[in-house]
Image: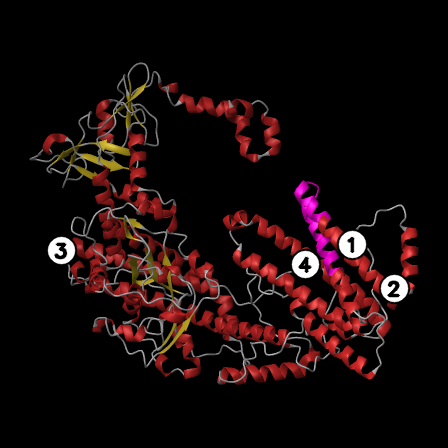
Amino acid sequence: MVLSMLSSNPGKLLASSESFAFLAEAEVESKEVLRLEGRGNLRNALCSSCGDSSPQYRCEDCFSVDLHCSSCIKAAHQRHPLHRLQKWNRNYFERVTLKALGLHIQLGHAPGQTCPNPHRAFNDDFVVMDSHGIHEVLLDFSDPKMAATFCLLEEFHLLSFESKVLAYKFYNALVHRTDNTGLAPPKGRYESFVRMICEWQHLSMLKRSGRGHDPKCVDATGEGDCAVLCPACSHPDQNLPDNWKNTPHTKRWIYALFVAINANFRLEHKIVSNNIMDPSLKEAGYKEFLAEKIDVAQEKFTCSSHNTVNMADTKTNQGLAVTGLDTINCAHHNMKQPNTVGDLQKGEKYINMDYLFFSTLCHSSLQTLNISYDIACQWHKKLWQCMTAFPTSMQFDYVSKAISFFIPKFHLPAHCGWANINPMASNMKEMRPSVRWDTLDDFFGDWNWKKVVALGLYVHPLDDLKEGLKEEYGEVLEQWRSQVERWEDDQSRFNPLERNGDVIALTSVQLALAKEEEQSLQSGACISLYEDCSPSILISSGLELEEQQQRLRANKDAHGLHITDNQEGKLLEHSNALQCRIDSWVKMQELYMPNVAAMQISDNATAANTYSSVESFKLWLPSHIGRMVMMLSTLCAPALHAQTAILKYKDWNLCRQGANTRACNMLKAINMRIKAATGRYESVHKALVILGSLLNESGWQSALHPLNHQDICSMSNLLWSKSDGRRKISWIWNMRGTGGSEKDDNGALEDMRIEWCKARAYAMRWEEEVKLLHEEMCCIGAFLRWELGRWDARHNEVIPTDMEHEDRCMAYAQRQAHLCRELAALFEALWAQTLTHLSTQDGSGGYNMPYNHCK
């Protein structure tokens, strides 16, 4: 039905979308596809090989569709025993196998040779699985039951990485490709297929890691020997200069190891089997150690409510053998380190993390370690005390190393590293333990390898870094720079990144005005016309009424046209109450400002035919009172901070679709408050413009600018596409205060000072990143050359059992060496311009460092 509708007007579809361009030729193409079901122009053709007059067979997988006789097509497929044949039965082509035609596969003999002593396989039911389907073949001289071609295993291997296909679904696809009618389905071979996949994964891992070239054989493989290493990380004796240990202390961070610890609780595993029934080749030492420490209680997390730690001993894990997975990655390139993947049996226990942490660092001779972990604040406190409980082979001298612990500023990017394996979470949940671990190893190895071959694209050239403010703040900048440098040398000194000044609030101004009025009353300079309302009380009350008008206006706008009777009733009650308060305030205003009555009469006469709501009623606040400027100025700052607090709450706590859906009422209230705060600031700013010109007050203009829509944003909006080092903050976060001095001599530049110190830190970190970029490029080139030399030497280390063994080992070693050589050449070409630029930099931020290993 859909296709008939699409083809009804192909010209129109061609104009609207290129996706339907095929419809113009659909009729011709459909005839050609249908033509393959018959013999076409070969109805009277002879056998294309011997000229027989009645050819009946053709091959679906050969390039040609010529017809052959039975003997010729069998001879032609001596080298292609897994092709699919069809036979013309005078009406149509039907499926026929080479086994039915008598084609034998003779192991140990070249195609075409006849075995002098053939021995047919037992039961004659040998099956071979191939990309084209499941084939039954005749086999001589052996009694296997099933085999799979390397082509099929490699195809599944790649599909599992790219499309996350399950072995079960892949096998079913083969079954349906063999027989999609269900009339003659092949026998179930799924379990055998899974075993062959596991064997293929393991053998591929051994082959690519060079274990087949080891004179001590595969049994000598140690822990982590098959891992794909990160070429950009520092590896002593592999990609570091010989004198790297003599690097000055101030530059030793260049050769630091950056690792990040992260857990994933999506990778659960059900209790499917046990280690006795289904032992795994991995995790043996890890599980044995945890079994000995099963009674160790988890220390509670005191810094924050981290449930994965605090509830590790109490959270239920019924039906689960594993509640998650923990890994230690290269923090810069997100590559899994050797021996750093382990199961979490119940929550995020320190004992699990400690084992993986010590497993990866005990073999490192680097002197500088940077450890990133979201709970590092408490985890590291007793880390070295806990190390004594581990085997001596996992312990190391931490005192001689410079080890720093960090908490990632934003934890979400850390979870992006699980994008490759998370789609397999539901698939691996019910796998056998051994199969699951083989799959994890396989996927992490593929993830690391993809990172390696793409390093040429991931390592970008540097961008220019600029820090600073306007030249007019030169003296202040020098003061800030000296403060932050003193704090960096001695963190017990004043921290310029923290606020130390008091924020002036409206209540503080009201208190100051009250004290000023008290002094005026005592001196007799102030004459109050109403015993319960002084001039300052009149002003502050008027400002409060104006704020209530703004809130009422925002509430009415939020409800819109579809307002309920209940909502309309509440709004009317608020309006009536506000009108009564305004009427009372206006009566007191007329005592101090007699001219206001005439202005109100004139204004009412002008708007006689229009309805004036209570929220739009003009209060005619006194524009000739100097202290009004002070109060209006301090009203602006709380309004801006209210906007930011609301925006931060929305950004930080309502960042997911589910949370936004559940909190729609809260979001509505937040938007109302934002609108009210914006309206409040705009009205106050207009009043300041009028009063400032009359009273010659100009200090407020340097801090309080006209508020545009794009200015209403958080200082640290993490949802922006730009990072902290690139973004520009809104002017509301550059406010220097609300004092009368343009230079803010009283220290109200705190907000700007804090932002400048943070920007300086970003610039310094970027400068370090540029140096690390140069070092990583050099490390990658040196590592690939080291890997190249290792493959060149491997074929000489092999103890050949025969000439064939020597030949295949040498061929594979040279192929891998050529791959390393090609990758090194590619990366060098990609980075040539950047490396030239980096190597010619000089000055205070120069990059002329002794990178001997770059040559």
Local secondary structure at mark 4: helix
Tell me, for residue 590, which label it has, or none: 2
Q: Amino acid at mark 4?
A: Gln
Q: Quadrant of residue 308?
A: bottom left
Question: To which residue does mark 4 refer?
Answer: 710
The CA distance from mark 4 to mark 1 is: 34 Å
* Span of residues in magenta: 546-572
Q: Quadrant of residue 562?
A: top right
The CA distance from mark 2 to mark 3 is: 114 Å
Residue 466 percent coordinates (x, y):
60, 72
Residue 551 percent coordinates (x, y):
70, 56
Image quadrant occupied by the C terminus = bottom left
Residue 721 visible to the viewer: no
The local crowd at label 1, few if under 14, some if 14 to 19, many if 20 or more residues have their Cα within 10 Å, is some
143 and 853: which is toward the camera: 143
The CA distance from mark 1 to mark 3 is: 105 Å
Question: To which residue does mark 1 refer?
Answer: 579
Q: Give the mark toward the camera: 3 or 4.
A: 4
The CA distance from mark 3 to mark 4 is: 76 Å
